[in-house]
Image: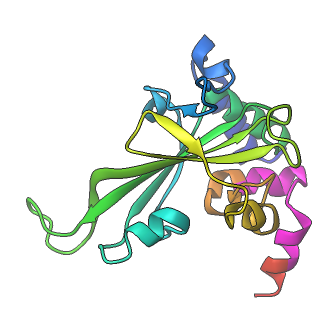
Amino acid sequence: MKPMGTVLVLAAALLPLTAEDAAAPQFNGKGELQLPANYREWVWLSSGLGMTYGPAAEANRDRAPLFDNVFVKPAAYRAFLATGKWPEHTMLLLELRGSISKGSINNGGHYQGDRIAIEGEVKDSARFPGNGWAFFAFGKSASGRMIPRSQDCYTCHPTKGAVDNTFVQFYPTLLAVAQAKGTLNPAYIRDSKGR
């Protein structure tokens, strides 16, 4: 294992693991995904500016670019560091926030503002036949409705995601893990070489 990989695995081992972190995602009686109250205490994977796509992009077309923050439960993060793949019951949350450019002493850059929406992705092969993944739109609610399978996310993620239906290519520390473990999606490898 390379030194950086060793550091990542050791750092992940020091993260406290609670029963809630290890538990499967929770759904209500309508099949809606429940938003964990502590998701901002999960492992932060990355942030982007103006990378919004899908329903949130359409709803915010005339606004300043949105920030997106991606979080994953510590147990799933640890498993990814060890294997280069996401385990069953992985739950990733994409938090979309407005961007602000003028405020306080800032006059040029952008910083994050109010939360606009949250979207989620869950891996549960028993609940979601096919490739085992499903997407959810929370908006500002504590319950997320499953995004219909007719939406582009169900065809885009498996072919454009670097690892296991997810855009690991935008999570620099995890992309290195996937490369070292040999778990990159062949379609992603072909696509990235064609650029």
Q: x and y percent of residue 73 in the render?
A: 61, 31
Residue 122 or residue 32, whichever sits in front: 32
Q: Magenta stretch: give its range.
A: 175-190
Q: x and y percent of residue 4 in the render?
A: 70, 47
How many numbered circles does the render carry?
Answer: 0
Residue 184 falls inside the magenta stretch: yes
Q: Residue furthest top?
A: 19
Residue 6 against residue 16 in the figure, above or below: below
Q: x and y percent of residue 139 in the render?
A: 42, 48
Residue under the image location 45 percent in, 71 percent down = 58
The figure's colour scheme reads rainbow
Q: Residue furthest left?
A: 104
Residue under the image location 14 percent in, 72 percent down = 107
Residue 61 or residue 151, whichever sits in front: 151
**Left or right, residue 100 beside residue 29:** left
Q: Quadrant of residue 192?
A: bottom right
**Left or right, residue 164 beside residue 10:** right
Main SS category, magenta section: helix
The image quadrant where one finds the N terminus is top right
Residue 130 against residue 47 in the figure, above or below: above
Residue under the image location 75 percent in, 62 percent down = 161
Residue 181 falls inside the magenta stretch: yes
Q: Residue furthest bottom?
A: 195
Q: x and y percent of residue 36 in the render?
A: 49, 27
